[in-house]
Image: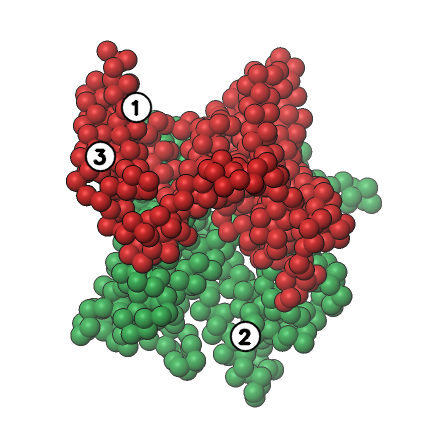
Amino acid sequence: MTRPARAAGVAGVALGALAFWLALPPVAVRSAVVPIAVGALAALAGAWTISQRELRLGRGAVAAGICGALLGVLATRAGVGNLEGVVVWSALVAAMLRFATPLTFAAIGGMFSERSGVVNIALEGMMLAGAFFGIWGADWGGSWVVGLLVAMAAGAVFGLVHAVFAIHLRADQIVGGTAINFLALGLTGFLFIDIYGSNGTPDLSSSQQIPDVTISTGNDFFSNAFGQLNLMIWLSLALLVVSYVVMFRTPIGLRIRAVGEHPLAADTVGISIYATRYAAVVLSGVLAAMGGAYLSIGFVHSFNENMTAGRGFIALAALIFGKWRPFGAFGAALLFGFSSALAPRLGGVSDWSSYAVLFQALPYVLTLIAVAGVIGRSIPPAAVGRPYEKQ
Amino acid sequence: MGDPGSGADAPQAGPPSVAARLAFYQRAGGVVTPLLTGLVAFAFGGVAVLATGHNPLTTYRAIFDGTGLNWLFPWVTGASRSLAASNLQQTLLLTTPLILTGLAVAFAFRCGLFNIGGQGQYTVGAIAAVWVGSSLHGTPGLLHILLAIGLASAVGALWGGIAGFLKATVGAHEVITTIMLNWVAYWAGTYLFSLGGPLQSSTQSSVPVSNDVVDSAKLHVFWGDPLLQGLDVGFFVALAALVVFWIVLNRTTLGYEVRAVGYNPDAARYGGIGVRRSYFLAMAISGLFAGLAGAIDILGWQFNLNVNDIQASTIGFIGIAVALLGRNTAVGTFFAALLFGALVSGTSTRHLDPTVFRPDLARNLTLLIQGLIVLFVGAPVLIVYARRAWRRLVGAFA
């Protein structure tokens, strides 16, 4: 019974996406009936899936159908000319990757920390530290390599502080993380104003910026989307594969997960809880800071007070939405990156400009829905947030 | 400090729930912890000031004068006294919402929940208050104020209640849900007041701001010039909220249940207390306090809500530091709110003498001090270690 039900559920989700896609270029259906009909079909498939007791998938399909129909109807109301300006798929893909990269770094960092049993809501602060110290290092050392290394070191220091308080001092990990966020905000702002004053950070020379990797310079879809991406974007994809292999295919990963799920059992078989957690939390600081350094010396080429502006929290959301798995987190980061890439473009369309802002709330709403268990429940590692005391 | 036995100070190897650590943390040293923490944090801040080549003492002195707390000294007279009075009014204007957002964190904390959502609850409260306050023309003043405050509190309670509901029903961690709700409130507010948004000003079409609150719905200013942001009666509402907080927690069945759940949810459930109901109510009441803070800021001195106000506000986040430093008690919250209100107001561009220390640097100094306080207060074991080291030191000399 479950097989056809699952297939119907997946088809429903796909139909929901189709409902929106049909209204966009290159197809650009102009009649509101089409997305409504396709969306309704998706919802029907979802309803049938629910009746077959595949609740989560069914609800997901219903939600996808409704969202797809709504977005599709919205799209049919805008002029095709406007839409073609907004929805250039290759540019959207490139922008999506650019927005998703800092999130990917931080989310994967958060995965290591949380899989080992230490809650890390300090990703935001670690990322901010990476952003500031990245540009400071690049300015001081005259090279982006130095900048990146300084950023990673700064992230490691913040990670270490979080680790000491969470592991040895057994402080509440959420309180500690909140403190790190305040500290990073204050420290980077303090140093930024003390060192650079009201002039802001200096212009970076090309050797101080993380370079782009040029693969192809043509004008086809592939070249426009992937031909000229920043080195850090490729690095994040490599990190993704490596972290998956480490976490799920090596003894190291098994240890990290054991420490996060059942520390007492792990301790009994001789795994050092403290060493594992320290390593994981420091690593999370390093990775989050790399995401921050990408922002400052790879993407924007300057620094501002509080420039991460909540991206660390979106990364946390991506981690939860992706169920504490590398590819899940990456998928969520791509989704959130897509909404970030689309929002400013929608702002350019006159009928939509005020709605575009609402797109920015999408990652948070989706995460709320995810933790509420509507579309597949996100269950954290069992021992996350609990300090471990040696017996 | 009523710890029995000198050798029994070692941190208990108790069950690792939030509530158990909370209980330990409440016991770990009365008012000594917050005082020590504050001193250490200010000392660290002094080092940061020193590193920029300024004298920390004169800087702290200038910040203190900027807070207006020197008004309390009888020997300050004449022009400096009236300046101090106006500075103190600003400090207390900031203390007011901080008391309330501090209570929003503290109340949930007493139930074993960590409410990071004070900021979002504050924002939705402010949005509701500005909407009611700037519409419904012709409503009698007091009724208008009550309507605005009532709706703001209700919306704040709803925002907190969502997190409480999700915690009670599906067990979603309140930290995650409140962080997400903060950002939803942030973007919803940005949408409502941005150009072309549904609540954007009808008179200024090119400014992302709400309509102004009508005069009759503004709170009465009882100290200082109403045109120069004097202190409004909202301050007394915050003081009353402290009393209500104390009474509800210590003298009602609800408060008893909330505290019981905070100490040990399993024992509370075994004792017949509705744990889920307590989670929901604690979060809703928390949100109510924060929503009230938003309403009082709007009706007391802001009178309109700008997109920048929503995006730059940190009142709810400072509330976390207030509650932690105030050890989640009514009296503690008052003094912690006063401290942070004074810090923020004393380092503002308007009050800090720029020839002594740059206000934009000092603003970040405030954040640093805040971060250090939260960091140290969150690790009660540190105090135990410090006390043990102190005893050893004293023992070595005795």
Foreground pick, A253 / B290: A253
Q: Amino acid at mark 3?
A: Gly
Q: Quick check: do tags 1 and 3 share a chain? A: yes
Q: Position of residue A225 (x, y in %)?
A: 49, 39
| Residue designated by label 1 | A10
Q: Is residue B378 left or right of residue A270?
A: left
Q: Circle 2 sits on which residue?
A: B350
Q: Does B351 appear above or below A313?
A: below
Q: Looking at the picture, how far across and down is residue A256, in whole percent?
A: 59, 22
Do labels 1 and 3 touch, CB within 8 Å? no
Chain identifier for the green-coloured part of the image: B
* Chain hosting mark 1: A
Which numbered disc, 1 or 3, marks the residue that appears first in the sequence?
1
User: For the N terminus of chain A, which image quadrant?
Assistant: top left
In depth, the one of A17 and B333 nearer the eye is A17
Query: Element under label 2?
Result: loop
Chain displayed in red: A
Mark 3, residue position: A39
Circle number at residue B217: none
Q: How is the image coloured?
A: by chain
Does residue A344 appear in this view?
Answer: yes
Residue B176 in the image: above or below residue B222: above
Image point 55% across, 54% down: which residue? A306
B274 lies above or below B244: above
Amino acid type at image mark 1 = Val
Same chain under badges 2 and 3? The reply is no
Q: Is residue A66 visible?
A: no
Which residue shows up at 77% across the image and 45% down it? B394
Say few, some or many: other residues with alpha carbon within 10 Å of mark 2 (under 14 / 14 to 19 / 20 or more): few
Mark 1 falls on what kind of element?
A: helix
